[in-house]
Image (cartoon, rainbow, N blue to C red):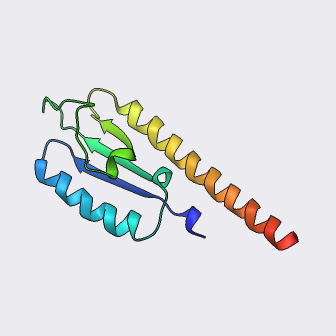
Amino acid sequence: MKDSHGVVIIFNADTPSHLKEIEMWYSCFVQQQLLQDAQCLLIAHHKPGSGGERGHLSLPSPMNKLKLVHSNLEDDPEEIRLEFIKYLKNIVNSVSESRDREEMSIIT
């Protein structure tokens, strides 16, 4: 059941080479597994004092359609925890809906 999978990609948003690397990870673990966009979460981590511009990160297509969360554990550690919980709830809902569809297809 493909709906039960999810991928979280965490990268250092302050390191330009990481943007190229996440393209490879996205290709291998999202595209090749035929996952939906909602099953992937990108976490752009900013080191404290890095001066990274939150919200101004340019991602290549099709990764620019994925949920992107900016993380800075010094400024707002609670934000990343809440976003991760939302992501997990989305995966659980997806699994539940997929299971319901499979059960209905067996019954009919």
Does residue 97 appear left or right of residue 67 in this picture? right
Q: Position of residue 12 (x, y in %)?
A: 20, 47
Count of marks, rendered view: 0
Classify the position of the N terminus by image quarter: bottom right
For image coordinates 46% across by 43% down, the residue present is: 84
For image coordinates 51% across by 42% down, the residue present is: 85
Is 29 drawn above or below residue 75 in the view shown?
Answer: below
Does residue 107 appear left or right of residue 58 in this picture? right
Classify the position of the C terminus by image quarter: bottom right
Q: Quadrant of residue 69?
A: top left
Q: Position of residue 14 (x, y in %)?
A: 14, 41
For image coordinates 76% across by 60% down, the residue present is: 100
Does residue 38 appear left or right of residue 27 in this picture? right
Which residue appears farthest toward the front when viewing the image? 61
Q: Position of residue 105 (x, y in %)?
A: 80, 69
Does residue 5 appear left or right of residue 92 in this picture? left
Q: Quadrant of residue 45?
A: top left
Q: Position of residue 23 (x, y in %)?
A: 25, 59
For image coordinates 33% across by 28% down, the residue present is: 76
Camera-nearest residue between 73 and 27: 27
